[in-house]
Image (tube, rainbow, N blue to C red):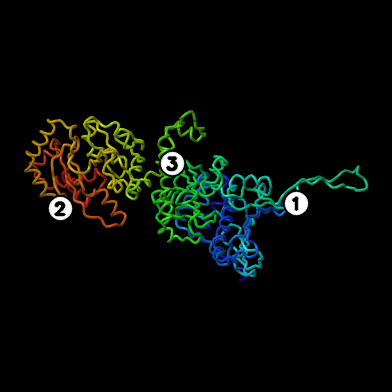
Amino acid sequence: MTKQTLSFQAEVAQLLHLVTHALYSNKEIFMRELISNASDACDKLRFEALDKPALLEEAPTLEVRVSFNKDAKTLTIADNGIGLSQEEAIANLGTIAKSGTKDFVSKLSGDQKADSQLIGQFGVGFYSGFIVADKITVESRRAGLPTAEGVRWVSGGSGDFEVESIERAQRGTSVTLHLRDDALEYANNWKLKGIIAKYSDHISLPILMEKEEWKEGEPIDKDDPSKGTTGGGMVMTGEWETVNQASALWTRAKKDITPEQYQDFYKQISHDHTDALAHTHNRVEGNQEYTQLLYIPSKAPMDLYNRERNSGLKLYVKRVFIMDDAEALLPGYLRFVKGVVDSNDLPLNVSRELLQESRDVKAIREGCTKRVLGMLEDLAKHNALPKTEEGVTDVLSAEEKAEQEAGLGKYDAFYTEFGAVLKEGLGEDFTNKDRLAKLMRFSSTTTDTVTVSFADYKARMKEGQEAIYYITADNAAAAKNSPQLEVFKKKGIEVLLMTDRVDEWALNYVNEFDGTPLQSVAKGAVDLGKLQDEEEKKAAEEAAETFKPLLAKLKEALKDKAEDVRVTTRLVDSPACLVVQDHGMSTQLARMLKQAGQTAPEVKPVLEVNADHPLVKKLEGSVNFNDLAHILFDQALLAEGGMPTDPAAYVRRVNALLV
């Protein structure tokens, strides 16, 4: 192939503009990304070589080499991994194929902290090299291809790149950064070693750098020592040394790993700029032998709810990398967890299909799930910071102190980011449903913060109260101001406010908590049991009897909209509200299913009216009875966040009455 000049994909061009003009908050992340890519290339070769040992050619030892040339102002990161073919160089270095790219690019808006956190999350870490370089040269040859089929890729980070064929003896890839004048600090042995120690110490293969040593100056005149010597300086020795630990972090004893090393490893595997909230590191022995190192992030990725996103743990078998994003190792509702599982028992040729079917994998999955739930339970137990238990006091970071002052504990922080995803487990994981129910948090009519657990609610239930009351709504304002809460507010009964889209679905699988039934205030006739005195019950029965003819007339007028019409005691200030039968689908869930393009049954709610309200009393002798009846229904629908089926007709009726 002769030299070609090709254009970048539109998203790449936009990304490169942002990289070169905005990403300056944490420049050194480019080293983390490029070394991580080199390590991944070696892992891929190791995996492919299981079936094709010839791919290792004459160099079975996999490694990454970092070198620089001060005079040429270059920095090179080279690996002897899988390498790139010509087609792969064009595709991989000129296009971002991963889903969610446009969303990613839109987030790269110059917010420096976000920029440094997001870079790498979408497989675009290579382009971070342009933070410090005004040109990048990539030379590569894919393992197994002839030496004549090497490729050179060159770009100045503008709108295009050049590709040409080259002769390349060594397999693998070398990425050479032509450093900007303001980035020459990275052509420095000490600086690079520090960055590697910070970000890449846990890479499980050796990262090599050429040794430097001090060389004394030469005599200016060998025959006349009095003339002095030339200045000495640091020179390269030609010997290479390993500058990282070069052993997988999870294989080391916990006592030999510092908290900083755990956090650095998390940042390496997750491409996250912030510390993890918690981690667990265990060696499991028994029927299955495996090591797990699992992390709970502090921030949710922006594509957490994208169904196409890849998620899961890194899977190794006997320290051989098998795959990223092994989804079968954790249930879907824990897809935010990052980490590594290293099994001693799985076959090296395990595929994604075999993972889904393997009994051994199911045992690992159950073990990982229990560990993660244990971490969450521990965070919830010690949510107040700092904790002092049995003489042990946590040392708080400045960030944690700020959280404490703001009244935000670690579990609160977790739940704010991942609570809605965790709720999916109520319907997906029957085995752990009770453990998950204890981890749920909500706001309520007595608190705006999402910190109330079912146990908290039970502890402050009124004497004689027989159920945990809750309401689901599209948002907090709709829930808090719902007419269905009026009698509960009047009697001082706390109601949990559930406003996540998943709540309505999840609560179909939770009928009680610790022996106390859960009751939606929007389902069935209100029954406060012992909390309602005999006088109130008698008044309600009398009103129902007195209003029988009116209720029959309303039912006839609204026969196409309402399943039934009845008098209620749940309303205090509002004329009417909508409810559904005890085991019926709520109108909110039906709306959500339709919005998602799914088939939903037609829900005909029950209209409940307040017999003491002036508008309801006015109905009896009104000449505009039908119009008033429809307005009453549509207003009740609006109050719960719905929309009249015929908004224009609703407006006409209201206008006619106003005139």
Residue 94 picture location, percent across and down: 54, 61
Residue visible at 60% across and 69% down in the picture: 145
- Report, in whole angstroms, how far the alpha carbon at label 3 lies from the one at label 2: 52 Å
Type of amino acid at the residue the image marks with label 1 = Thr
Residue visible at 9% across and 39% down in the picture: 544
Q: Which residue carries the number 1 mark?
A: 237
- Is residue 243 shown above or below 441? below
Type of amino acid at the residue the image marks with label 2 = Asp
- Report, in whole angstroms, how far the alpha carbon at label 1 lies from the one at label 3: 49 Å
Left/right placement of residue 638 relative to residue 184 reads left
Nearest the viewer among 139 and 410 is: 410
- Indicate the quadrant containing the C terminus: top left, top right, bottom left or bottom right: top left
* Secondary structure under the numbered disc 1 in the rendered image: strand
Q: Earlier in the sequence, mark 2 or mark 1?
A: 1
Q: Earlier in the sequence, mark 3 or mark 2?
A: 3
Residue 20 picture location, percent across and down: 57, 52
Residue 582 picture location, percent across and down: 20, 45
Task: Give the numbered dot on residue 375.
Answer: 3
Type of amino acid at the residue the image marks with label 3 = Met
* Secondary structure under the numbered disc 2 in the rendered image: loop
- Report, in whole angstroms, how far the alpha carbon at label 2 lies from the one at label 1: 89 Å
Q: Which residue carries the number 2 mark?
A: 560
- The nearer-to-camera label among 3 and 2 is 3
Left/right placement of residue 584 relative to residue 400 reads left
- Is residue 286 shown above or below 543? below
Q: Can you tell which quarter of the image residue 374 is in?
A: top left
- Indicate the quadrant containing the N terminus: top left, top right, bottom left or bottom right: bottom right
- Is residue 227 shown above or below 85? above
